[in-house]
C-alpha cells in the first residue's frame, strides 16, 4: 500500500508541477523516477517512446507503464490517477472564472512566460535525447531523415516508427550474423 501511495504522490507531484505536456515532463520524470528506483533512464525513454506511438496522452501512457512495471494493474491505476488528478483539479477550479482574468495584462504576460519556459524545457529534452541516442553516423543520418520525413515531407510519425522498427530488425539481424561467424 505504501508503494501505491508513493506512486500516486510521485506522479501527482509531476502532474502538478509541470506545464506543457509530455515532453516538458520528461526531465522531471527522469529525475523523480530514477531517484526512487521506479524506472531507469533507459527504461523511461523506452516507455516514453512507446507512449508516443500508442493512443492517448504521452505522460499518462508513461505513468501507466511505470506503474504497471512497479505494481501491476493496481500500480498502473495509481500512477495514472496521480498524473491526471492535478489537471482535473486545476481545470475544475479555473473553469468557472478564467474568462474574468484572461484579459488582464499580467496574466497574459505570465502565460507568455510559461510558454517560453516550456519551449526551453522541450529543447533541453531534445538535446539530451540526441546526446544519448545519436551514437554514430548511421544514427545521425536516421535522425535527420526522420526529421525531414516528418516535418518537411509531412509523413505520419507512425509510418516512420514502423519503418524504423523494420530497419532495426534487419540491421540488427545482419550484425548478429556477422558476430556469430
Image (cartoon, rainbow, N blue to C red):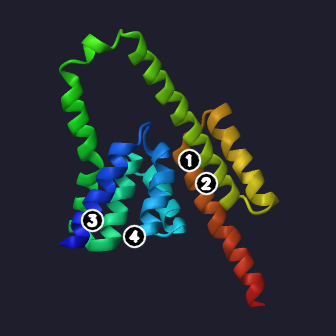
Q: Name the residue at 23% across, 67% down.
A: 4
Q: Earlier in the sequence, mark 2 or mark 3?
A: 3
Which of label 2 and label 4 is nearer to you? Answer: 4
Coordinates of residue 71 in the picture (x, y in percent) = 27, 73
Coordinates of residue 5 in the picture (x, y in percent) = 22, 64
Could you tell me how far apart the alpha carbons at marks 1 and 3 are, in whole angstroms?
Answer: 37 Å
Q: Name the residue at 21% across, 38% down.
A: 89
Determine whether label 1 and label 3 are within 8 Å by CB: no
Up-down: is 169 above or below 99? below
Q: Earlier in the sequence, mark 2 or mark 4?
A: 4
Q: Which residue occupies the foreground of this view, 103 or 74?
A: 103
> Considering the numbered disc 4 on the image, is that residue within a helix, a strand or a loop?
loop
Which of label 3 and label 4 is nearer to you? Answer: 3
Question: Left or right of 155: which side holds 53?
Answer: left
Coordinates of residue 175 in the picture (x, y in percent) = 74, 77
Q: Earlier in the sequence, mark 3 or mark 4?
A: 3
Determine whether label 2 and label 4 are within 8 Å by CB: no
Which of label 1 and label 3 is nearer to you? Answer: 3
Coordinates of residue 143 in the picture (x, y in percent) = 70, 50
Q: Name the residue at 48% across, 62% down.
A: 44
Mark 3, residue position: 6
- Location of residue 63 (image quadrant): bottom left
Q: Earlier in the sequence, mark 1 or mark 3?
A: 3
Tell me the tag on residue 67.
Answer: none
Q: Earlier in the sequence, mark 4 or mark 1?
A: 4
Mark 4, residue position: 38
Determine whether label 2 and label 1 are within 8 Å by CB: yes
Mark 2, residue position: 163
Could you tell me how far apart the alpha carbons at marks 2 and 3 are, in whole angstroms?
Answer: 38 Å
Amino acid at each position: 500500500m505504501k508503494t501505491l501511495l508513493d506512486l500516486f504522490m510521485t506522479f501527482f507531484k509531476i502532474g502538478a508541477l509541470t506545464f506543457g505536456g509530455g515532453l516538458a515532463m520528461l526531465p522531471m520524470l527522469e529525475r523523480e523516477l530514477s531517484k526512487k528506483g521506479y524506472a531507469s533512464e533507459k527504461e523511461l525513454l523506452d516507455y516514453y517512446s512507446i507512449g508516443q506511438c500508442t493512443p492517448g496522452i504521452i505522460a499518462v501512457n508513461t505513468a501507466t507503464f511505470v506503474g504497471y512495471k512497479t505494481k501491476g494493474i493496481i500500480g498502473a491505476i495509481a500512477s495514472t490517477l496521480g498524473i491526471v488528478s492535478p489537471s482535473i483539479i486545476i481545470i475544475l477550479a479555473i473553469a468557472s472564472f478564467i474568462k474574468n482574468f484572461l484579459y488582464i495584462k499580467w496574466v497574459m504576460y505570465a502565460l507568455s512566460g510559461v510558454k517560453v519556459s516550456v519551449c526551453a524545457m522541450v529543447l533541453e529534452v531534445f538535446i539530451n535525447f540526441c546526446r544519448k541516442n545519436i551514437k554514430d553516423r548511421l544514427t545521425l543520418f536516421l535522425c535527420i531523415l526522420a526529421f525531414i520525413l516528418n516535418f518537411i515531407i509531412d509523413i505520419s510519425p507512425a509510418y516512420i516508427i514502423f519503418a524504423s522498427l523494420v530497419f532495426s530488425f534487419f540491421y540488427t539481424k545482419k550484425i548478429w550474423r556477422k558476430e556469430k561467424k
